[in-house]
Image (cartoon, coloured by chain):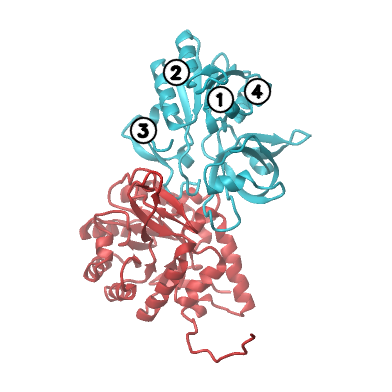
Chain colours: A red, B cyan
Amino acid sequence: MDLSLEIGALRLANPLIAASGCFGYGVEYADVVDLASLGGVAVKGLFLAEREGHPPPRIVETPSGMLNAIGLQGIGVHRFINERLPDLRQRRATVIVNICGTTLDEYVEIARILSDAEGVHAIELNISCPNIKEGGITFGCSLPGTHAVVGAVRKVTRLPVIPKLTPNVTDVASFARAAEEAGADAISLVNTFLAMAIDVHTRRPKLSNIVGGLSGPAIRPIAVRMVYECRRAVKIPIVGMGGIATADDVLEFMIAGANAVQVGTMNFVDPFIWSKLMDGLRDYMTRHKIARLQEIVGTVDTTKRETAWISS
Amino acid sequence: MAVDIDAAVIANRRLSADYNVLAFDAPEIAAAAKPGQFVMIKTSGGQDPLLRRPFSIFEILHDAGGRPAGVSIFNKRIGAGTALLSRVEPGTRLPVLGPLGKPFEPIDPPAEAWMVAGGVGLAPFITLAAALAKRTTKTTLFYGARRGEELYCVDLFEALGVTIVLATEDGSAGAHGRVTAPLQAALASRPLGNPVKLFVCGPTPMMRACAQLAADHGRACDVSLEQVMGCGLGGCYSCVVLSRGMDGGKPHHTRTCIDGPVFDANRIMWDAVSGH
């Protein structure tokens, strides 16, 4: 039974990746999850320098989902390499470092630094965080910006480069294409949907940042549709995400076109979700006699259906 | 290490329209739990509400043979999740993850422990009182609420030999006014040579006031903070509080779930603390 896949030169043992921003720096979860058993660990987004992020309240629950506006609090790339990476390396985690920049040069500089660090396996470019004004999303919401930042990082690293796309655009597939043309090894999508919640009694926003990003099962069907659109637009691997809660959800993303998936919000609800997802994938492969899980990627059957027996 | 148990509700003891005590069959959590730690509870089987809720461990329950058998929580009906927990039937199974967080550090005689609780902030103090009783540390509970009917479970503290000082805002039980008034009087009359440590949990303004009183009188003070939490394990960075490091340096957003919920009150930048 083969659950593995490749992103550039990187081989992932299985398609289950912990989503950036939802798993700390990985080490926080080492007591409850064998980090080496995951396909990958996408660590919390890093700028060059430390960042404090937004004041609380930073999250609010919504129907089958949540809004967050953490504001990319983080320890910066140097402290990550010195204080967290050795532990991740020792635990044999496949480490995907999510990086953020306020300028193109910052992305390039972080990518350079990480390329020299032992134990970093891939770079995910955060060009899609909806919660900070500077950088990031301004690249992710412009086709030339996406092309430029992916191309610039591509030039300075041999690590696989995975731009993470925002769903807050009209046509996500065109951004997937721009990323592929600029040399991305894969794309990941979707980041959160820009959203808002208001306390009607105080008439104040429920988040200190006023707006935040919606995640969780509430967004899943939109994310599946976007993965499907991107699969038809690009050849490179797609890492799909958006409210995955069960093995069937993983399979839905894969059949829509994802080669791997990330799980974020539902890891908060159930930190032991990983082994359950893995068991479910194995059961499915057994039941459907699938030897390599990658066989199902993009196999959604959209041909016109014969009119079947219709029971009144 | 935290475990996740699909724990059966053993009992739902109603205290009032808004308060109840829920007991769970969770021996592994009971065996590992320390005073002031918390659990994350999924309040429904579905996806609404989606996230777990954090609760201080109210009691560590033992079976007839004295073995750890379960934990209880002190639930106040506030939102959708706590409303579900308010009416849950015994026998229902709910995922309970724990024990989590940094515990209180109990103290030994001759120092005294003064616990200060406001409203639902009573929650972490039975486990602390039990730990202090084992050390024969003289313990006092200053407990405030709006009305006398909202002072709960005082008998549990009396059974542990705790001295009780009550205060209500309407004067219907104990001192008339806020609990910080009898606390201030007690601090003022205690000779400096007699050590005492404060342990505080309650509404943010109360904790801020207690922290100030402790600082004014040169007493150590631990606070147990409650913030909106996403995961309880340090993954989401939602439950942060602005606090100074152990070295007293520049304040940082610190995760309440893994660096707390118990903090030295001196570390907290109270003007930045949200909540009520």
Give percent across and percent down for residue B75: 59, 39
Kind of residue at badge 3: Arg
Relative to B225, does residue B54 appear above or below in the rendering?
A: below
Residue named by callout 4: B134
In 3D space, how far apart are the residues under numbered discs 4 and 1 (Cα atoms)?
10 Å
Q: Who comes first in sequence, dot 2 or dot 1?
A: 1
Residue named by callout 3: B244
Residue count near mark 3 (Cα–Cα under 10 Å), binned few <14, some 14–19, many ≥20 = some
Foreground of the two, B156 or B172: B172
Q: Which mark is residue B219?
A: 2
Relative to A20, does residue B103 appear above or below in the rendering?
A: above
Kind of residue at badge 1: Pro
Q: Are marks 4 and 3 in contact (CB under 8 Å)?
A: no
In 3D space, how far apart are the residues under numbered discs 1 and 3 (Cα atoms)?
22 Å
Q: Which mark is residue A289?
A: none
In 3D space, how far apart are the residues under numbered discs 4 and 2 (Cα atoms)?
23 Å
Give percent across and percent down for residue A295: 51, 80
Describe the element under mark 1 as helix, strand or loop.
loop
Residue count near mark 1 (Cα–Cα under 10 Å), binned few <14, some 14–19, many ≥20 = some
Residue B110 figure quarter: top right
Residue A22 relative to residue A283: left or right: left
Residue found 42% across the figure and 29% down from its top: B205
